[in-house]
Amino acid sequence: MAYKPELLATAASLEELEKLMAAGADAFVIGEARYGMRLAGEFNVELIAEAVKLAKPKGVRIYAALNNLMDNDTADSLGPYIASLHHIGVDAIVFGDPAVLMAAKVHAPGMALHWNAEMTSTNYVTANYWGRRGATRYVLARELNMEQVVDTTAGTELELQVQVHGMTNIYHSKRSLVDSYMEHQSDSERLPVKDKERGLYVIETERQDERYPIYEDANGTHIMSSDDICMIENLHELMEAGIHSLKIEGIMKSMAYNETVIRAYRQAIDAYVADPASYVFQEEWLESIQAVQDSNRELSYGFFYKEQVY
């Protein structure tokens, strides 16, 4: 079978999932906050089942996010939850905690397992460690540069996933830091809403032009990057390396924005797959993204071309 990378997306709702499928997404990561971390939207089991029904006829895959930090109560509930996901036809589970892997082996035999520990997935030895324990995909840390990404492809047979577009998390605390700050300022009534829709951000004293989105949810406080990764110009380097899955992170982005981005990356991937030897980047793909990009957020290459990144 000829190489064709997966275009992986997130979705905040069933409506967005349908729109992004039409735009060209091959797969989605969705889930609920109890089990998944930093999700674009909340999908309980019933909504995940609806997503599967919408996706399966179109050959689109649904992955359930179970990459949260697991306490004892959550770990105890994993068996029934994973059994439900298996029953409704979810294609894979995204996990970081071994408790998820062990529960999946019992309650969802044969289901694909994608290991995602964010910052610590930095080498192929670790990839192969999890591969021997049942993982089928290794989600690479966003702090790796291109050379390290390519080296990892040569050292493992696991599928590799790389984020190619969107904002990234730079800090997470289980504490409610915004609430604590407002209480310290004796102004706790001023911000009754602190979620992803509120539009809060942090500014550094030394760099007033850098704005870092911040929000709170059931999993604590999340501070996000001040810019957005955009690898569409250099996507061919990742495809030449044989990266299996290219992820568009749609958290805190509008449906229209994500739809535009998915269409652009779909065109680039299809053009490369059709004729890798003659592939040429088309400026209009980037220009379509630039047209909807927030003027306060730069498009960047992330860590892909930095020498020391972690």
Image: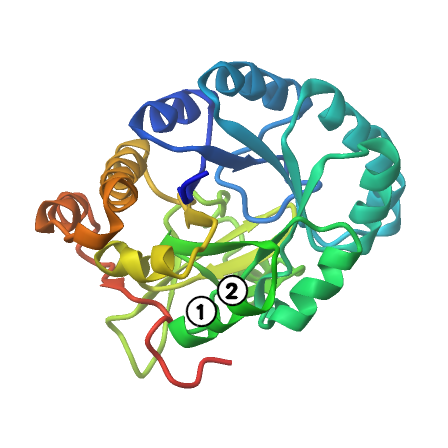
Are circles 2 and 1 on residues that touch, CB within 8 Å? yes
What residue would you read off at disc 1? Answer: 150
Bin the neighbour count of mark 2 within 10 Å (Cα to Cα): few under 14, some 14-19, many 20 and up: some
The foreground one among 57 and 39 is 57
Element assignment for label 1: helix
- Residue 272: percent from left, percent from top: 26, 47
- Residue occupying image coordinates x 9% and y 51%: 283
- Residue 180: percent from left, percent from top: 60, 62
Q: Is residue 252 left or right of residue 172?
A: left
Find residue 218 and name its label: none
Height in image: 211 above or below 56? below
- Residue 149: percent from left, percent from top: 46, 68
Height in image: 292 above or below 146? above
What residue would you read off at disc 2? Answer: 153
- Residue occupying image coordinates x 36% and y 29%: 20
Res 292 → quadrant: top left
Q: How is the image coloured?
A: rainbow
Res 264 → quadrant: top left
- Residue occupying image coordinates x 16% and y 50%: 286
- Residue occupying image coordinates x 69% and y 19%: 88
Residue 309 appears in the rendering:
yes
Bin the neighbour count of mark 1 within 10 Å (Cα to Cα): few under 14, some 14-19, many 20 and up: some
The foreground one among 208 and 153 is 153
How many marks on residues? 2
Element assignment for label 2: helix
Q: CA distance from mark 2 to mark 1?
A: 5 Å
Q: Is residue 276 left or right of residue 58?
A: left
Q: Which amino acid lies under the numbered mark 1 shown in the image of this protein?
A: Val
- Residue 199: percent from left, percent from top: 37, 49
Q: Which amino acid lies under the numbered mark 2 shown in the image of this protein?
A: Thr
Residue 143 appears in the rendering:
no
The foreground one among 73 and 8 is 8
